Image: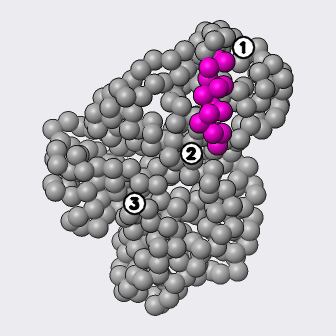
Amino acid sequence: MGWWEIDTDTLARSRFVVSPLDETLACLKMLHAGVAGHPGERAWLDTHRPAHLRRMAADPVAALLVGSGLGREWNADFLTPTPYEGESFEEGVARIRAARPDEARADLAVSLGGTLPAALDRDDLPERAAALLEDVWTEAVRPDWDRRRRVLEADVVARIAQVSRGGWAAVLDTLRPGTRWLGDSRLQINLNPYPPRDLSGAELILVPITAQRHGWVAWEEPERYAVVYPCTGALADDGARAVPAALGALLGPARAGVLMLLGSPMSTSQLVGVTGQTLGSVGRHLRVLLDAGLVERRRAGRSVLYSRTAAGEVLVEAGGAGEAGEGWT
């Protein structure tokens, strides 16, 4: 298995970063694989994958580049630069475009685990990769980036609350499949037989993405390392669900949507992030739900978490299991 040795200084410097470039890279991987992790992703793929497949059919070099650099066990390093806090998509993709052609070819050979195909023995690979990512960003990610960003930021809030409750080990142990805190300053990053890496003194960056079946690691040795991981639970399904009509008629669609989300504990900030409602609106909905005995709250470190009571569970189940209703995002 591959693992990183992480000392206390590195853990102290660890931080979360929301990256529009990594979200776009994850979406490109999903377009290439064609596999959805939940109904929201399936709807997104149904909308955008036909155009992606037409683009790949019209540009065999780009198709080979994607399949070689992002579709294998290991990503080509030049395609996955370690993100910086506050970096825009344009700034991130500029780093891909600026990669040296010889480095891009070498990275692709590593990701392929063999000889580079003759069709990829060319100098315009960084430009082609950047242009393709710009198309995915413009057509399939940027139109709903505000919603995606809210979901990612809500996940960060949840992870930070987890740090306050159980420390960094609790967070690192549950980031993504194959990632596990082994103790003794060791973080397992995958199940592959790669040599360990010593991150002493480096910066560890944790980057959430909404794509449920993807994730990767990246680094700029020796200063910066990143783990890109999928959001979990209710935060993952980018608001694609609908409120059952009966429950929406009883409580109102927005308030019913809040109640539906609270099948697992969430803070007010998380609810604001996921629903897109204002802090005042979420607070009013929570007060009504609390007064009605449908939700309860408890303190976890510096956060207050809300979750459904038994009565709330009964109401959600009775309010329209399997019944279509109104969207609430």
Q: Earlier in the sequence, mark 3 or mark 2?
A: 3
Main SS of the magenta segment? helix
Categorize mark 1 by other alpha carbons within 10 Å: few (<14), some (14-19), many (20+). Answer: some
Which residue is labeled 1 in the image?
Answer: 315
Which residue is labeled 3 in the image?
Answer: 85
Percent position (x, y) of residue 176?
42, 43
Mark 3 residue element: loop
Mark 2 residue element: helix
Q: Quadrant of the C terminus?
A: top right
Disc marking residue 202: none
Percent position (x, y) of residue 218?
35, 61
User: Type of residue at label 1?
Assistant: Leu
Which residue is labeled 2 in the image?
Answer: 151
Percent position (x, y) of residue 99?
40, 81
User: Type of residue at label 3?
Assistant: Glu
- Could you give the CA–CA distance between mark 3 and mark 2, rounded to whole angstroms? 17 Å
Residue 237 painted magenta: no
- Could you give the CA–CA distance between mark 2 and mark 1, rounded to whole angstroms? 26 Å
**Looking at the image, which residue is at 59% across and 74% down?**
134
The boundaries of the magenta stretch are 275-289
Q: Quadrant of residue 205?
A: bottom left
Mark 1 residue element: helix
